[in-house]
Every structure is written in structure tokens, then in C-alpha cells.
Image (spheres, rainbow, N blue to C red):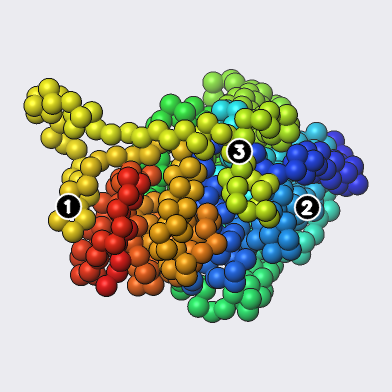
Amino acid sequence: MGRPNTAALAVAAVMAIAVMGGLGLARGGLYMDRYEGDVLHLAEIVMRLVQGQRPHVDFMTPIGPLAAWPIAVFVKAGLGIGMAVHAAQISVALIVALPAVWAGRTRFTPGLAYLFVLLCIVLVMALVHGEADPNISMSMHYNRWAWAFSFVALALAILPARGPGSWKIDGAIIGFALSVILLIKVTYVIALAPAIVAALWLRGSRNTLLAAFIAGVVLLGAATVVVGPAFWPAYVADLLATAKSDTRAYPGLPLDQVLTAPTFLGGHILFLVGIVLLRQGGRRSDGLCLLVLFPGVIYITFQNFGNDPQWLALTAMIAMMLRPDVSRTNVFGWPLNSGTTLVAACMAAMIAPSYLNMAYSPFRHFTDDRDQFVRIFPNSSRHDDFFTLAARANQVDMQVPGEKRMAPLEDAGLFADRDPPSILNDEELADCGIKSGLVAWLQATAADLEKTGYARGKQILTADLLSNLPLFSDQIEWVMGGAPWRYDGVPGLESADYVLVPTCPVDERSRREILQAIRTSHVTLREVSRTPLFILMEKL
């Protein structure tokens, strides 16, 4: 089969961006119904960037600057954060479209080329992180963006060019893609680089490998000029702190369970069977490249909460392009071409629900009933385009230990394995966790602080997973050196004027560890206010 038409591929990419992005813009804002904490985490990073703060240098996060910078650009230009999200996704999709079209044209047959390009666009333009639940959220969007650029780099590295190619263009695109990924989520580069290097080396594409290295060095050098040399050691320090964290070293299952979890095991087996079939069919080096890739994609799945094995879609297409000749059979007489096709089809079927959910999410977002949503920032005339479900925003549900409320259960003495309580100045705080109503809690807390005069010009560190009160009050300042999402230690304690201790935190373990770390640091806290929502401690 011949090469796909470049212009037609480009038109398909632009049309997909226009439809998916146009639906978001036409909606007039961002309407989400899940993972408010993650979205507020993103909003904090964006607002800090808009104020000129530098990630890793001025605040702690393991996420790279390009995960939020495209959104911050549009907020700084005057858009509300809801519309800025849509504009940013369109911009990133347009950036990834050109290299995706090149990879599709030079590596795939026409039908697969269109599918490849559309999958890259869907990964960028979706309004849900994946899975099969019909929800809308911008949580973990950086994983989608990183996968889109990873698809391009992997396709160019693993698959040989179909017809005349250009090692200079291939290398430049691979270097560009890896540089972008490094500034979005560095773990993707760590996980995928060995397979990319192995593939180019085994295919004899040493010139492409060199061009990719040079392009990466030039682009990252240019980035260093922008962010400053202090950025890189600070970035590494944040990554190491996250890796050593007891609470967030990994967000889901342990590695051994990720390998064997029912959700993933079928795909893992199919992937390994496909490698065996390729090697039996004479594709020994190609099979070896995929084998080197296998630990990397497992690691990415392990490192990212709710991150489906998106790589199954790409590896299914790679398997289709690398199928052995129809005449090849193995020692059992199995036709290896048909066997590889079957494995690819099964991998595609396994990941189809996730991609269909992502592809449909802008349509679902456009048609959801507006009356069920409320503004997350009702006091902001600029950011009044950011909405969440009223039930999730305003219905405050809390979780408390049952045996602490019911004497017969506590007297039974069967509950001795609970974590120790949080201790604040020798006071044992009641165990509690807020499960919904986070937006209402933050709005009420910020309003109380403003009313009692503790907000104006003050940096207030919240002893919890999130510490983002400035999103809900123009009077409260950002904690310099703080963390939009707390992974370890007490980031920003040195700068904080007050420590706010929630009576019912988002994450009880974070509250306990923060208070323990403050005691260890010998910082003295004096209570200045107590309400049903929080205890406010002044740092002496």
C-alpha cells in the first residue's frame, strides 16, 4: 500500500481539533463533575505562574512547567481559567498535529495513519483523563498530553520509514517531543528513552539518534535561558522528594499489583505474546525493542493515578505494521501474520473504552445540563467560567471512624490497627475526612478568615493535602515555597504567617504528618482562632 496523503492527514487533524475544541469554546466555560481537588491543584499552579512564580523554584511540584504554562498564557492574556483550558488544549493539539502527521505519513499505511493522528488529537483534546466512567474533569491532563508526544516519538523510533524518509526530520521531531515531555512529566522520558534509543540503534539509525540528541540539547538549552539555571536542580529536588514520599511515592497500586492486576494483566499478556510472535516471524530486533519498552510503559501506568494503559493503542498499531510475512508460521504451524493481527485487535479492544470516553467527552461536556452546575469562584468576575456540579460543591460529606462514635464498637477492642491521631500542641484531634463539598469548605473558610481579619496580606499554610485558600480570597497571599499538592514534608513553613489546621481535612494522613513535621522542626504555634471548620495557629 502507498503512503497516506499528507494534506488529507493534516485536514483530518485540523477538523478533529476544530470539532472537539469548538465544542469547548462554544460552551463558554469548563463544566466539571469529578476530581475537584485535582482541578484546584491545577488552578493554583496556573495562578502562581500568572503571578510570575517559577515552578520548583518558588513552589514545589513534581509536574513540569509545560503542564500548566499553556493555560497560564491565556489566563495572563485575559481569559477566565475555564476558557483558558479550552484554548490551551487547542494550542497544544495544533503543536502536536504537525509531527503526528509526519509520523503517520512516514510510518503507517493510510488507514492506520488516520487512526494514529486522530488518537494523538483525542489524547490532547479530551476532557477526561480516560477510564470508562462518563465524567468531565481536567484532572491529570498532563498525562494525556505526554502520551500524545510519546506516541509520535515511539512511532518514529520503532517503525522504519515506508519509502524515502528524512533522518534529520525524524531526529528533530524525536528530540522535540522528548524535550516537551521532559517539561511536562519527566517520568515519561525516563521510562521511554531506553526503548527509543534501543530501537534507533538496532535499526542502524545512528544519524537519527544523534539528530534527536542535538535537537534535545538545543531545545532544553533554550528552555534553561527562559527558566534560569536554578530550575533544574530544583526540579530534581522536587522529583526526589516525591519519590521518597510515604504518601505519594505512587498514587495507586504497588508495582507488583500493577503487573498482575486484573485491569492490566490481559494487556500485559497480549503484549508479551505479540513480542513472541514477532520474533518467531523473523522480527527479532523489533521484538527486542518492544521488550525493552515493556518495563517503561508498566512504570508509567504505575506512576499515574487513573492512567489507563494508553500504550496499548499504539502498540496495537505498531504490531500491525510489523506483522511477519503471510507465509511465515511457527513450530506449531500457526500463521504468524494472522496471529499478530489477532493480538493487535485484542489490545485495541481492551483500550477502546478509554479512548471512546475521551473522544466523546467534549460532546458530553457540551450537552450537560447547565442548571446542575455552580461557579467554583463565585466572587470572581473574571473566572466565572469555571463550574462544578452543585451537589459535589455544596453537599459536604465527611467520613469519621465508626467505633469512635459508637461505644459498643469501641469497647469490642477490634480496631487497634488504625493510624495514630493528629496531635496539635498536645491536643489529640478527632479523625475525620472530607469526601465531598471541598469547594463549599474552602469558600466558607476563606470568608471566615476575611471576616475576622486574619486574611489580608497573610500567607496561610493549610495542614492538608491542598493549601489553596488564595484561590478563594484576594486578600490571602500564596505561601512562597508551598506546594499546590503536598507530597512530603511541610513546604512553605518558613514563609507562612499562619498554619490553618482543618478539623476535617481532605487527607488525614497529610494533616498528621504535617503537624508531626512541625513539632520536629521545633516551630512554635499559638492558637489565635477556632471555628467548627478549622483551628488557626500563628507561627511564633
Q: Nearer the viewer, residue 142 or 32?
A: 32
Task: Using residue 363 as the reference point, say whether residue 274 is left or right of it.
Answer: left
Could you tell me which secondary element the residue under label 1 belongs to?
A: strand
Q: Are marks 1 and 2 in contact (CB under 8 Å)?
A: no
Q: Quadrant of residue 400?
A: top left
Which amino acid is tagged 3? Answer: Val
Residue position for label 2:
94
Mark 3 vs mark 1: which is more N-terminal? Answer: 3
Q: Position of residue 387 (x, y in %)?
A: 62, 41
Horizontal side, residue 113 vs residue 48: left or right: right
- Secondary structure under tag 2 reads helix
- The residue that mark 3 highlights is 374
Find residue 401 and report its horizontal and vertical position in percent. Answer: 24, 32
**Does residue 539 sit above or below 318 in this rendering?**
below
Name the residue carrying label 1. 427
Q: Residues within 10 Å of mark 2 (few under 14, many from 20)?
A: some
- Asked if residue 250 is positioned above or below residue 223 in the image, the reply reads above
Neighbor class of circle 1 (other Cα within 10 Å; few <14, some 14-19, many 20+) is: few
Q: Which circle, 3 or 2, is nearer the viewer?
A: 3
Residue beneath the point at 63% across and 72% down: 223
The image's mark for residue 260 is: none
Residue 538 in sight in this render? yes
Residue type of the residue flagged with mark 1: Glu
Q: Position of residue 286 (x, y in %)?
A: 61, 44
Disc 1 and disc 2: Cα gap in Å?
55 Å
**Viewed as shown, does residue 355 lie left or right of 511?**
right
Q: Are marks 3 and 2 in contact (CB under 8 Å)?
A: no
The structure residue drawn at horizontal position 43% and vertical position 68%, both measured from the top left corner, is 458
Q: What residue type is disc 2 on?
A: Leu
In this view, 493 is above or below 33: below
Identify which residue, 514 or 272, lies in the foreground.
514
